[in-house]
Amino acid sequence: MKEPKQMSVSAIQNGTVIDHVPAMYLFKVIQILGLDRIDNQITFGTNLESKKLGRKAIIKISGVYFEDEDINRIALVAPDAKLNIIRDYEVVEKKVVVVPDTITGIAKCMNPKCITNYEQVTTKFKVVSRKNVALKCHYCEKITNQENLLII
Amino acid sequence: MQILSNFDLCQSGQINSPMIMKNRSLVSIDDFTTEEILKILDLTVEFEKEPTQWLLEGKVVATLFFEPSTRTRLSFESAINRLGGKIIGFSDAANSSVSKGETLNDTIRTVNNYCDLIVMRHPIEGSARFASEIATVPIINAGDGANQHPSQTLLDLYSIRKTQGTLENLNIFMVGDLKYGRTVHSLMMAMSRWKATFNFISPEELRMPDEFKLYLDNLGLKYYEHNDFTDIISKADIIYMTRVQKERFSDPIEYEKVKNVYVLRDSMLKNTKPNMRILHPLPRVNEIHTDVDSNPKAYYFEQALNGVYTRQAILCSLLGIK
């Protein structure tokens, strides 16, 4: 009997593992973190079973460590994401994401009359509530809440 | 990137010298600290005493009105003329390159080269903030859709302080369209700095939105809601009237039911306080009966005049002239 082939992606020597990403937002997380534009080895799995999320995704990035400020940018789409920082195959640190004070260029303003929906303007929001996410548009000053939140 | 207004920064002590208004834009009333607002009101007193001062000689001010406005534009242009400045601009987007498809970004970048300050009204919300980030000259927001109209708020504050002698602890009644009216929202937020009590009188459909009530709740300020005028107005220091507009109602029958409920008449003013004054951002249609006009408590036309002095003070402050 043949031995099942071991996936070569199962562990990384050095880098970051992002776990508990909602499966539907996997590619959005990749885009927000700019992982589609780097040369490092990246592997991901998606539609994995998760008791909490239903279906989750996991991303393993070799040789990359993120600043908190960068990683918190995914908080809107993956608020439950957990990071494992790997050095020499060992998890040396675990991190959770935190919704930052401001959100730039990730969310769409829900106000159809906002300038950001008319001209080439990067959206900017002040986070006015973290628990039930509520974002105040820097331009039109209207509130976009979780129900109306659209990721660009 | 932090997105904090100067008001936030001053509150948190991150700006030590808040009084430098030169070369800043006025997009939202929250851009200015309480101290800065009071400085503009004090400067307005000077212009009321002496309206014609040649302080903008040699300066060019662009008035870009992407949507029609008679009152605000004429008030700004009167203020600029009384200061000896020159005006360029347009009063209708149809007469500008916008009709050729030019973006706001390009219009602002271009006009920025021709003038020392831009006064702008635009139907799109947030357009003035966007313009202020592109332009190197100050921008005065003369109304961006339903969002902000800070020069109106400043002239309202001036009118209130002038008639009441103070801004502290006043009982402010707001009447009419409290849902969509940007002037009432801005004024309410501004007056909350001086611990006002608010009474809101409006039809059910046009009540003050929850986000503004929450704002008052968080500050621990009192407010009361009413469906119609009652004797309660005898407690008012200021009655701020607004127009209930037909187009705001989804059901025309609802409009017909309420259109005459929010009409202020001279006979209703008998028991009001002697210091009480009636304000209205104008234009008025029928919400203040013309029989109120001769009552000394009617203040709306003087309020419009105060607008010219207030705008003189704003122009000079942002250009660093006074």
Image (cartoon, rainbow, N blue to C red):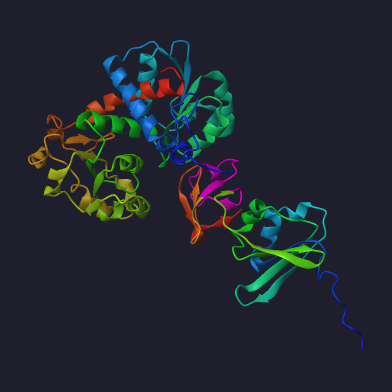
Query: Per the image, is A112 magenta?
Result: yes
Q: Which range is magenta?
A: A104-126
Q: Position of residue B274 (x, y in %)?
A: 11, 35
Taken as a whole, is the magenta stretch helix, strand or loop? loop
Quadrant assignment for the C terminus of chain B: top left
Q: Residue A121 versus residue A95: which sits nearer the camera?
A: A95
The reply to whether residue B89 is visible in this rendering is no
Residue name at image x 35 percent, y 46 percent: B180
Q: Against B157, is A134 above or below?
A: below
Residue A54 quadrant: bottom right
Q: Position of residue A21 (x, y in %)?
A: 66, 66
Residue name at image x 58 percent, y 58 percent: A98
Q: Is residue B138 left or right of residue B219?
A: right
Q: Is residue A17 left or right of residue B113?
A: right
The reply to whether residue A42 is visible in this rendering is yes
Query: Per the image, is A117 magenta?
Result: yes
